[in-house]
Image: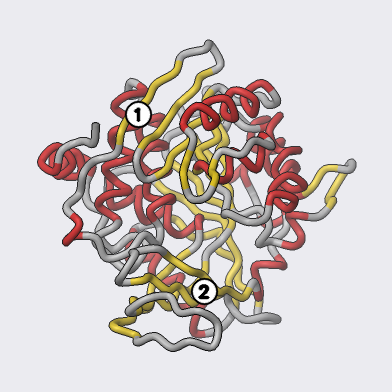
């Protein structure tokens, strides 16, 4: 029997309800700030990347594997998946705990984000929830280590749950990628380092690559591009990946297994269009993974990644301002690219 060629993206992991608030500024402890606006939306790596991909290309098949509560939050997230045309047959419902949620604050002064979250039912997601034999997608995007207690823990044969899922995916012919959150280095090291031998791609930010490589890539708020490239090489050498991409607001660096290095500056979106950075990292990953799925040259994939992240900055929500990939690149070219 000839199996059909795989096509599409499968996201696995975090779906949460985001209460997105734009505040006047982020206050010191015991301080006070004004809420300027607020909006309820979906969040988490599984949600954000799935919705972003569908916005970039409504013809791209997208599936998701996740867990939500049997509550208003869970119904809200399932509604988002349905509206976006995401196959959510493996969005499991667990009535024992509420749906994961996040209070996401964006400072109107700096546009930086601050998240306060509750794991809730996300802690109950296990490798057994992943029926990867039922998927037809080509790339599995997993996230977020540190947010899912069962997946973070030892599952079978001494492997943690993330490794168990990744092994299963690669045995079935899926390409694999993992999304991180900027947690403390120890948490990232304990949960993610064992995954490196089972990943095809790693797309992370400047802080996360430093945590994985044990290098001070960011010091006093300043990113060292040279150390980011060195960290990418070190992580690449320690894993099975064919590609490691490091990104931050000014630049992205991609390093491949054969030694190719590509750099791409970000696009110069006008400051008056920027509302908040919530979801910008997921948007970057969505653009990058879309390009990889379509077999684009590395430079074009990096351009779409930066452009998608820039577009996402125009909304307080994670995916509300992401548009089709052709329009995304056109907007970026109109804004121009940083030197």
Whether residue 237 sits left or right of residue 78 in the image: it is right
- The residue singled out by tag 1 in the image is 294
Residue 280, position as x, y percentages in the image: 38, 53
Image point (32%, 24%), residue name: 299
For residue 104, above or below residue 85: below
Image point (83%, 51%), residue name: 155
Q: How is the image coloured?
A: secondary structure
Outermost residue on the left side: it is: 334
Q: Quadrant of the N terminus?
A: top right
Whether residue 5 sits left or right of residue 35 in the image: it is right
Residue sitting nearer the eye, 32 or 146: 32
Residue sitting nearer the eye, 135 or 57: 57
- The residue singled out by tag 2 in the image is 102
Residue 3, position as x, y percentages in the image: 52, 27
- Mark 2 vs mark 1: in front: 2
Outermost residue on the top side: it is: 258
């Amino acid at each position: 029997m000839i199996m059909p060629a795989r096509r599409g993206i499968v996201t696995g992991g975090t779906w949460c309800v985001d209460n997105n608030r734009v505040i006047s500024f982020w206050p010191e402890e015991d301080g006070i700030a004004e809420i300027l606006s607020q909006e309820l939306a979906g969040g988490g790596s599984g949600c954000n990347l799935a919705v972003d991909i569908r916005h970039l290309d409504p013809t791209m098949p997208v599936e998701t594997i996740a867990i939500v509560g049997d509550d208003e939050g869970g119904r809200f997230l399932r509604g988002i998946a349905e509206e976006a045309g995401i196959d959510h047959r493996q969005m499991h419902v667990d009535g024992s705990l509420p749906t994961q949620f996040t209070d996401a604050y964006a400072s109107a002064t700096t546009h930086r984000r601050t998240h306060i979250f509750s794991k809730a039912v996300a802690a109950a997601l296990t490798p057994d929830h992943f029926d990867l034999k039922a998927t037809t997608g080509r790339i599995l995007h997993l996230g977020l280590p540190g947010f899912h207690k069962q997946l973070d823990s030892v599952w079978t044969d001494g492997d943690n749950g993330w490794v168990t899922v990744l092994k299963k995916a690669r045995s079935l012919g899926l390409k694999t990628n993992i999304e991180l959150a900027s947690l403390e280095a120890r948490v990232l090291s304990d949960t993610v380092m064992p995954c490196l031998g089972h990943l095809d791609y790693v797309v992370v930010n400047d802080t996360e690559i430093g945590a994985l490589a044990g290098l001070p890539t960011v010091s006093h708020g300043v990113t060292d591009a040279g150390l980011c490239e060195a960290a990418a090489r070190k992580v690449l050498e320690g894993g099975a990946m064919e590609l490691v991409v490091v990104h931050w607001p000014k630049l992205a660096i991609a390093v491949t297994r054969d030694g190719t290095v590509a750099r791409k500056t970000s696009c110069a979106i006008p400051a008056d269009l920027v509302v908040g950075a919530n979801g910008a990292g997921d948007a970057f990953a969505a653009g990058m993974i879309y390009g990889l799925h379509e077999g684009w040259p590395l430079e074009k994939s990096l351009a779409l990644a930066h452009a998608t992240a820039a577009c996402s900055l125009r909304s307080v929500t994670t995916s509300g301002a992401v548009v089709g990939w052709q329009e995304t690149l056109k907007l970026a070219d109109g804004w121009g690219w940083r030197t």
